[in-house]
Image (cartoon, helix red, strand yellow):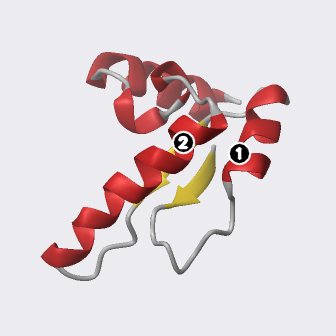
């Protein structure tokens, strides 16, 4: 999975690149990189970036129900 860092100071994977990653079949994650409680608010910025890129919730690991996340983790671990 590729990480979309939610900090507006760290747009390593901007919406254009995230859209391209999606087209190539990648799964993505949103990460606030929070070092304090106040920094969790950056998630809103990351969600906007993901929406702008057209990434559906089904392709964001953070949004999967726990059983689906565990299932994916087990498949990756077996590879």
Q: Residue at x 59, y 40 (%)?
A: 52
Q: Residue at x 59, y 30 (%)?
A: 55
- The residue labelled by disc 1 is 18
Query: Mark 1 and mark 2 in contact (Cβ < 8 Å)?
Result: yes
State whether residue 49 is above or below residue 52: below
- Image coords of residue 8 (percent x, y): 49, 73
Mark 1 burial class by Cα count in 10 Å: few <14, some 14-19, many 20+:
many
Where the C terminus falls, by quadrant?
Answer: top right
**69 and 45: which one is in front?**
45
- Asked which quadrant contains residue 39, the reply is bottom left
Eyeballing the image, is 23 above or below 19? above
Q: Is residue 37 left or right of residue 71?
A: left
71 sits to left or right of 2 = left
Q: If you read the primary sequence from the N terminus, does the residue marked by circle 2 or circle 1 appear first?
A: 1
**Image height check: is 35 above or below 7?**
below
Say which residue label 2 marks.
50
Viewer-proximal residue among 45 and 75: 45
């Amino acid at each position: 999975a590729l990480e979309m860092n939610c900090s507006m100071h760290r747009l390593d994977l901007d919406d254009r690149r995230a859209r391209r990653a999606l087209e190539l079949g990648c799964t993505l994650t949103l990460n606030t990189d929070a070092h304090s409680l106040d920094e969790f608010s950056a998630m809103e910025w990351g969600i906007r970036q993901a929406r702008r890129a057209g990434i559906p919730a089904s392709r964001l690991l953070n949004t999967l129900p726990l059983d689906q996340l565990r299932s994916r983790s087990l498949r990756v671990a077996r590879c």
